[in-house]
Image (spheres, grey):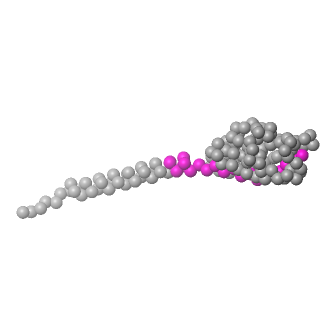
Amino acid sequence: MIKKKGIIPVLAVVILIAVAVALGIAVAFWATGLIGTLGKVEKLEIRTAYAVNNRNGTWTIILSGADTGSADITIVEVTINGESYNEINAIVRINGSSIPASIKAGEYFTANIIIPSSGFRSGQTIEVALISGSGTAYKRTVILP
C-alpha cells in the first residue's frame, strides 16, 4: 500500500502558525495599551518650602514644586502636624484655587497655607502634607520664623 502525502497537512501547519503569530501580535498591542493606561504615575515634587510671619497673628507656609509624574494630581486634603487644615482654621490655596485643587502632569504649583497663631509659635517645626485623591501624602517640614 502506497501512502500519499498531500499538501493539506502542510497547509494546516502554515495556517496554525499564521493564527498563532496573529494572536501574539494582537496580545502585544493589547498589553501595550493596557500598560500605557495603567502606567500613569502620580509624583509631586515639592522643591521649596518655607514660612513667613505675617505680623498679624498668622503665618503663611509656601510650598512650590511640580507634578513630575505622568498623571494629573488632585489635592483633596492638606494636613498640618497631622490635623486637617479645616480643624485648625487654616486657609489653603493651590495655584489660586481652594481644595480640591488639580495640578496637571508637567505643571508647576504654588501652595499658600495661612495658619493662625493659636497653637503655633515661632521656632516650631511644622509638617505639612498635601494629600492626593489616590491617598498619597506629599510631606515637607518648615520652621516657623
Residue at point 77%, 46% (across, down)? 80
Residue at point 77%, 48% (across, down)? 81
Magenta region includes residue 41: yes
* Rendered position, 118 above or below 46: above
**Residue 84 appears in the picture as rendered:** yes
**In this rendering, position of residue 75 left or right of residue 3:** right
Q: Position of residue 50 (x, y in %)?
A: 83, 51
Magenta region includes residue 116: no
Q: Residue furthest front?
A: 119
Pick the front one: 60 or 40: 60
**In this rendering, position of residue 77 left or right of residue 123:** left
Pick the front one: 19 or 4: 19
Residue at point 12%, 62% (across, down)? 3
**Residue 109 appears in the picture as rendered:** no
Q: Residue furthest right?
A: 55
Task: Give the extent of the magenta segment.
Answer: 33-53
Pick the front one: 125 or 76: 125
Q: Residue furthest left?
A: 1
Identify the image quadrant of the N terminus: bottom left
Name which quarter of the figure residue 16 lies in.
Answer: bottom left
Q: How many marks?
A: 0
Residue at point 85%, 52% (across, down)? 124
Q: Position of residue 128 (x, y in %)?
A: 76, 48
Q: Position of residue 11 (x, y in %)?
A: 25, 55
Q: Residue furthest top?
A: 98
Q: Position of residue 10 (x, y in %)?
A: 24, 58
**In this rendering, position of residue 54 left or right of residue 109:** right
**In this rendering, position of residue 85 left or right of residue 13:** right
Pick the front one: 75 or 145: 145
